[in-house]
Image: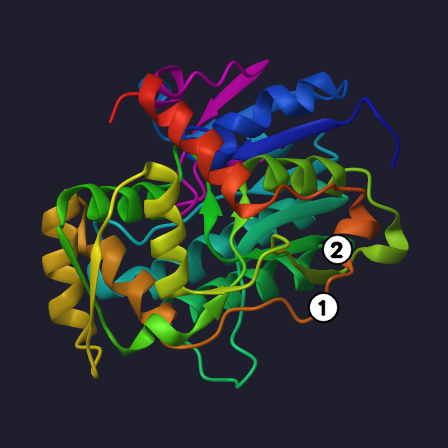
Amino acid sequence: MGGGLQTLVTGVSGYVGAALVPRLIRDGHSVRGFARSAERVRAAGAEVDDLVLGDATSGAGLDRALDGVDVAYYLIHSMEGVGASFVDVERRQAETFAAAAAAAGVRRVVYLGGLVPHDGTISRHLASRLTVEQALLDAVPESVALRASLVVGARSRSFRFLVRLIERLPVLALPAWRVHRTQPIDGRDVLEFLASAATLAPRHAGRSWDLGGPDVMSYQELMRRIADVMMVDRLSLPLSFNLTPVASVVAAAVAGEDPGLIEPLMESLEHDLLPRDDDAAATFGVRLHRFEAAVERALRDMEVQPR
């Protein structure tokens, strides 16, 4: 696929969707947005060429949104406001979207999901991401699924959550999951992967790709390194247990976040979340930022964005 594509960005009022719009426009693509609220899209600063209002669960607006589209970005997540039923909601949304995209003749769907533990043990959050991924790949065979763990960016909910905990807690009580490892990735690099996916050669499509930054670290080290960049000293209190339901409610309250979002995310911390390989950067042509550089940039951006 060449340049100048008609693209659709769903979830365009979210962190990734809003940031992706100007990147796609810079590449010469026409960008249509799909969202439930025009007000939220304006607040996110996503200046799309065309905005279609609708709902992925009911399918309202999808035919109009997908009409004439070459590449559709599926950036819809529904963990907030629906409780434990988010798994069913996300599955229905993905199936509805996938069927509509196939019927519209969309050539490629690009999806951003989560890394999967190598041992096969999987949380509700990551199981839902896999279900969505499979529905999209099955419906539109030339689709591309990207998997990442922690995205480091000023508007990344997971990253902001960690920063707030470090800011507000003089002692960081770290459950047993602190020893598990991950590879955080700079939000700027994620945007490059997403943008590159629009024109990725067909031989590299029809599958998932694992994304990770160049630095592997435990969650305890991740917290320490963020604190170091923030130039604050925080004592760590290692715990021998997880108690995720209780810990997530307390942590969400401290950080001013929704427990419905935090609990599924914390469940995913109970395993290593590492890429299966490091092939993606070379294939997509992305140069990766180191972790400290990513954190420094995100913290600078957070200073000028509403908290």
Q: Residue 67's spot in the image, x, y percent? A: 66, 30
- Checking the image for residue 16, the label placed there is none
The local secondary structure at tag 2 comes to: helix
Q: Position of residue 164 (x, y in %)?
A: 22, 42
Residue found at x 88% / y 47%: 201
Q: Are marks 1 and 2 in contact (CB under 8 Å)?
A: yes
Residue 66 location (% of width, % of height):
62, 34
Instruction: Name which quarter of the figure residue 157 lies in.
Output: top left
User: How many numbered callouts?
Assistant: 2
Viewed as shown, does residue 48 lie left or right of 246? Answer: right
Q: Circle 2: is it few (<14), some (14-19), or many (20+) Cα within 10 Å? A: some
User: Residue 279's x, y, as percent?
Assistant: 78, 60
| Horizontal side, residue 268 vs residue 134: left or right | left
Residue 50 is inside the magenta segment: yes
* Relative height, residue 209 to residue 299 (above, below): below
Q: Is residue 251 left or right of residue 20?
A: left
Q: Which residues are magenta?
A: 40-63
Q: Quadrant of the C terminus?
A: top left
Residue corresponding to mark 2: 280
Residue 11 seen in the figure: no
Q: Is residue 156 magenta?
A: no
Residue 214 vertical placement versus 288 (above, below): below
The three-letter amino acid code for the residue at tag 1 is: Asp
| Label ID, residue 277 | 1
Residue 302 falls in image quadrant = top left
Q: Residues within 10 Å of mark 1 (few under 14, many from 20)?
A: few
Above or below, 306 relative to 250: above
Q: Nearer the viewer, residue 80 or 90?
A: 80
Question: Is residue 30 among the parts visible in the rendering?
Answer: yes
Q: Mark 1: which secondary structure?
A: loop
| Quarter of the rendering containing residue 30 | top right
